[in-house]
Amino acid sequence: MAQKLNVALIGYKFMGKAHSNAFRQAPVFFDLDAEPVMKVLVGREEAGVKAAAAKLGWESYATDYREVVSRPDIDVVDIVTGNTSHAEIAIAAARAGKHVFCEKPLAMSVSEAREMVQAVEQAGVKHCVNFNYRKLPAIQLAKRLIDEGAIGRIFHWRSVYLQDWIVDPDFPLVWRLKKEDAGSGALGDLAAHSIDLAHFLVGDITAVSGLMETFIKERPIATSMSGLEATASQERGPVTVDDGTLFLARFSNGAIGTFEATRFAPGHRNGNIFEINGSEGSLAFNVERLNELQFYSRRDAGHVQGFRTISVTEGGEHRWVDAWWPAGHIIGWEHSFTHQVVDFIEAITQDKPATPDFRDGLKAQLVLDAVERSAASGQWVTIG
Amino acid sequence: MAQKLNVALIGYKFMGKAHSNAFRQAPVFFDLDAEPVMKVLVGREEAGVKAAAAKLGWESYATDYREVVSRPDIDVVDIVTGNTSHAEIAIAAARAGKHVFCEKPLAMSVSEAREMVQAVEQAGVKHCVNFNYRKLPAIQLAKRLIDEGAIGRIFHWRSVYLQDWIVDPDFPLVWRLKKEDAGSGALGDLAAHSIDLAHFLVGDITAVSGLMETFIKERPIATSMSGLEATASQERGPVTVDDGTLFLARFSNGAIGTFEATRFAPGHRNGNIFEINGSEGSLAFNVERLNELQFYSRRDAGHVQGFRTISVTEGGEHRWVDAWWPAGHIIGWEHSFTHQVVDFIEAITQDKPATPDFRDGLKAQLVLDAVERSAASGQWVTIG
Amino acid sequence: MAQKLNVALIGYKFMGKAHSNAFRQAPVFFDLDAEPVMKVLVGREEAGVKAAAAKLGWESYATDYREVVSRPDIDVVDIVTGNTSHAEIAIAAARAGKHVFCEKPLAMSVSEAREMVQAVEQAGVKHCVNFNYRKLPAIQLAKRLIDEGAIGRIFHWRSVYLQDWIVDPDFPLVWRLKKEDAGSGALGDLAAHSIDLAHFLVGDITAVSGLMETFIKERPIATSMSGLEATASQERGPVTVDDGTLFLARFSNGAIGTFEATRFAPGHRNGNIFEINGSEGSLAFNVERLNELQFYSRRDAGHVQGFRTISVTEGGEHRWVDAWWPAGHIIGWEHSFTHQVVDFIEAITQDKPATPDFRDGLKAQLVLDAVERSAASGQWVTIG
Amino acid sequence: MAQKLNVALIGYKFMGKAHSNAFRQAPVFFDLDAEPVMKVLVGREEAGVKAAAAKLGWESYATDYREVVSRPDIDVVDIVTGNTSHAEIAIAAARAGKHVFCEKPLAMSVSEAREMVQAVEQAGVKHCVNFNYRKLPAIQLAKRLIDEGAIGRIFHWRSVYLQDWIVDPDFPLVWRLKKEDAGSGALGDLAAHSIDLAHFLVGDITAVSGLMETFIKERPIATSMSGLEATASQERGPVTVDDGTLFLARFSNGAIGTFEATRFAPGHRNGNIFEINGSEGSLAFNVERLNELQFYSRRDAGHVQGFRTISVTEGGEHRWVDAWWPAGHIIGWEHSFTHQVVDFIEAITQDKPATPDFRDGLKAQLVLDAVERSAASGQWVTIG
């Protein structure tokens, strides 16, 4: 592992912690062709970024991303800032010739996403949008089974992404609940993941009919915030994003689907759940039990057909798990980020496209945009 | 139990067997104010109806429903014929002053359903549409919890009704796959149940956006049929109903919902499944585990919140189960029909409305109709 | 179905209701070679038995079983009295040449059971002990899979039978808690079922090491009782049976096992649960989800191995279910009794042994006895 | 975090990797009073330990543990060698005044364990045996609920530890299958964990009746081994440990229990499973779903009682999870090791006993020993 890849991480909150962990763990558990070096952590607020850099294991810190992305010693720029600055930073990094790793959703709009794709492609750098759930062993197994034809022709996609952290009407008006900061609510935060998984596993979405709803119209204004925590003031302000979004979809291959994303589903902390039905079988998954995949095969003998719960932890059988622990010793949510980093480094060292890349990010953005337009117009909206 | 209620059952296939069982079991397990007498079974084909009457426990049989519904000794007419004749028979029975019990879906169209409602209301007879799932103890518990406010203000309804019996493209073109016989496919057969449960548990549906799809366009023509079984010929004919239907919905109380009904979900034999999320908690149900209800309460202490699996089999706590077996000794699907009969008899003897009645059947029909129109037009359709 | 079999049922409480239902339903749902006629219900208390006979569908009633078992028009004697009178009645019935159907546990002791076996064998009548769980479709599927070699050589049996109806220390001292009436507590009531299932599925038990415990030593004396319900008095009396029993076992084929039966497992209403592990796979079952069987096969491809949940409701694939409803329309606990009746009638009409028969009842009794002796002595006890 | 604690890790295979990860992650995710410094990795084979040190993040490596444990710059000695050398190394480390962290099972025998306890207590150092499952948030919640009285007086403990990695008779004779290397088989490897959890959650075990079985008596001799992987030769040798062990137990507080540990349970990769029943409720857990705890409360209203599945991932409610990710973003198996390290460091910096400590290790050893003696004699064996 002679080669080194110097990484700059822009942003250091919840996602900064997760990405830092991925860069720290990847070289320990995997045999990489290049070693990621946690070179510099970037944030606008000096005290905060300094403390975070020390805590999270970065060699140094900086407060101006512009300087950092143009530093000649930086190879990779990883962007975990608020959604509003993804485009600006990614484009700057690409123009400076850096490989770009970006949190999802890729952008605030389709046009931003298009500019980002153009920038990275013109620069010829590697680019990746962190739809991290693709990088779970169970999702890889689902993909393999679909590619093997194990469930045949796909008829149905059915996904829900259920959370419950803002059911309390007194939960404060954090940035995720403001359109100007977040772009959208459950749609961009949650449904974006489902859309990417549907693209990965089923195929292209061609048309949608959507409905967006804000159940709690006003909330106490947040006065301070740390991670997902916030303190509420007496004053209230308007929630400007969707609390829940539903949509129907048609896929290019004839499949049909339903999508739901909500933060108003008590009992579901992070229920990224889907099921796929095909002519030969079915697959089902829930990220709260991310080490498991449900599989039903019509090819089993008639008297023993049933959904089986596969523990996707078997070395030699399931992707990436050899690197971790023996079978049945489950991995956690953050491991998906480590796998994403492993794949991204491999894309760089082997000069092949990263997955999912900015084009995948743009594809998701097109669907997000179509859902918003459909919800506004009450019409089906065609994509692409 | 001095009073007797003489029953005529029109039709004797799958549903005839289930209704006969209900009339036979109801007086044995429940203390009724009136005893249902299984007087006459009616069918057009004499040999068939004669054999069925003997097998299913009917005192006699007849081949012409018109004669039977006008017999002075008949009190109740129960209709389990094909959907095309529900209206005709129900209206005749009502005009003859009989109480009418009718299988779902109530009718082939909204106008038929309206005529049926008018007929029974003008006649002043009791009327019931057999959305039997309402009469499961678990559904009654769900209703009670909602009425008690246990889940608060409802935000989300999410239902799927998943079956898989026609996934094989060589499964023959039975009557359920022909529009002229069945009215619709998964929509009227399966989604109708979900719609009624949503009406019962959440409230009125006010608008829908639907999508209907037929995955297998042609099938071998069926040459003979017995129950759900059929023999296929070499010739093929067009499937004229939906294999799967999806729709989004808005409710009058502000809740939003998704509905799906399909016969193309391998691994699900009869997955009538729903979840409801409210401001105080959630409920979830699957008819394949019909003795259980999932309940999540935000009022539980913070460290012990979680979906609980309630065994809805506790005498003294859960409706109807006292009549059967001790706790944990589960009941089956057919028991819902017995409960429906018990309730219908009580409506007659106590002169109160049956539930669900023809107005509920009409309400469901309005939604079915709206979904079809929405799927055809690509527009949202408003109901009522 | 020219032949008729006239049945006398001795006893009419909880089990009387279940057996009556079985005799009533069997000829309706199954094609039998002989029709069971519900001739006479027998009980010592006239008012009670008279009302029960009318309610449960018996043609007549009687108060002296001795007269009834010698009546020439009676073909089958079904015994659901308290455990103390099983032997006496069964022997009398056998001597009178009647086929005998008897609730479990067969007897109060091994010697009683031996006499019963001798009586029925000498009389040459058909005999059956109602370990009804054998007659669930899921258990039949388990047996078939084992016989097919689907789980290979069996290593482990692991069963628990968990109930919770007497956890409250103020629950009164009903007959089931008195040794003179019940013989034993959780052991004979619950573990007896597990033992029979182990005999059926795994093989003969050859040695046991047991432990029996009574957690609540005294309870309020019961003053009246109806079914499982009872009223408590102020006075307390000693509980003389086991609240919970545990034992280890060795099987003749080299397998080893654990058994537990308790009425002190809150949350389990009727948790008759077991798992079997063999060289090729595993099976798991819980009677509270009696329509399902869990099956794991080591012969599945390595990447898709997992416990599958089989819905044992598939006509053509699973035993008895053709007679009931379409796939996924689940049956209840009482259906096992109907299947037992169907099998018993077939044993009579086809002149073949019933299963499980009194020899199976005796085999279970030998194990119950060995467990009691082991618990008393603190030693392993060998059987047979 | 001015203080530093220099750590020497003795051993570097499977457990070395897990412990290294824990020392690396602890200071990043937790606010510690002292920073663990990964000073030196020790192993007998130079090439192996050198490579491992580089990979796992240790500053240096060494081949002689004796030199290392006496180095003045070492504060903590962590032992993950084969079971045969735990005692020797721990005693040497204690005598050198080092805090000792030791993998389970603590020792090869009760006498070894006693010597180890004596050594650490005489030296006045902190000592911990790594029964890591105690350090899962779900287990801490179980403990808290028991301590709060949420399940009342405990009646039953029921544990199984099920694995399936040696079901294949051609799996080679690795060190874990040899008595001289491993001490015992499933007993010491798996049941030891269950015993410690029972001690932690229920109380002291006072007597046992055990059964040990080796299903496959001979296996191909292993020629090379890496982690759990090994290559088999043509020659076969005897398996000298138990494949499966069962035992019954009595606890000092009147509870009774069953324990099972086996490597012959197909479908269970790492099924460390238990259930506890008490007078007020029940708890159930499976380490393959380690982020969840099942809880049943008799104090819930009668109509809504049921086992609830708690997602033990809620910041502010559940121990340690604040340090990781938002609710529903599950952690993995290895996180239990990190928590153990966090607790051990706190024991050192706050000068309080570590948990579980060597006395807990000795207590488990006493039970292991009693089970072996009981299995050999066929008698109950009393402990302590």
Image: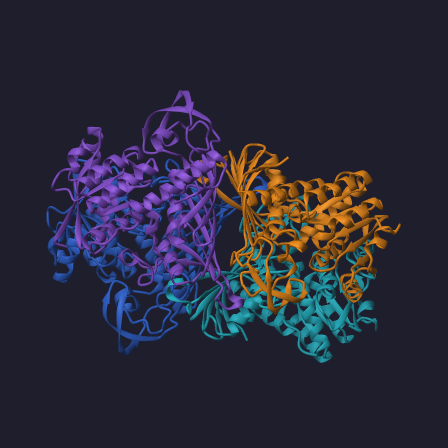
Chain colours: A orange, B purple, C blue, D cyan
Q: Is residue C139 left or right of residue B20?
A: right
**Residue in the foreground of this view, choosing between A240 and C327:** A240
Q: Is residue C345 left or right of residue C59?
A: right
Residue D248 on image: x %, y %? 48, 65
Q: Specify the quadrant of the image occupied by residue C142.
A: top left
Q: Quadrant of the C terminus of chain C?
A: bottom left
**Residue in the foreground of this view, choosing between B283 and A219:** A219
Query: Quick check: can you spot residue D378?
Result: no
Q: Residue at x 65, y 71 (%)?
A: D113
Residue C151 on image: x %, y %? 49, 44
Residue C67 on image: x %, y %? 10, 55
**Residue in the foreground of this view, choosing between B352 and A311:** B352
Query: Quick check: can you spot residue A315?
Result: yes
Q: Residue furthest top?
A: B235
- How many numbered marks, from 0 up? 0
Residue A356 on image: x %, y %? 69, 42
Q: Specify the quadrant of the image occupied by residue D9.
A: bottom right
Q: Quadrant of the N terminus of chain C?
A: top left
Q: Residue at x 82, y 46 (%)?
A: A98
Q: Residue furthest right?
A: A72
**Residue in the foreground of this view, choosing between D5 and D29:** D29
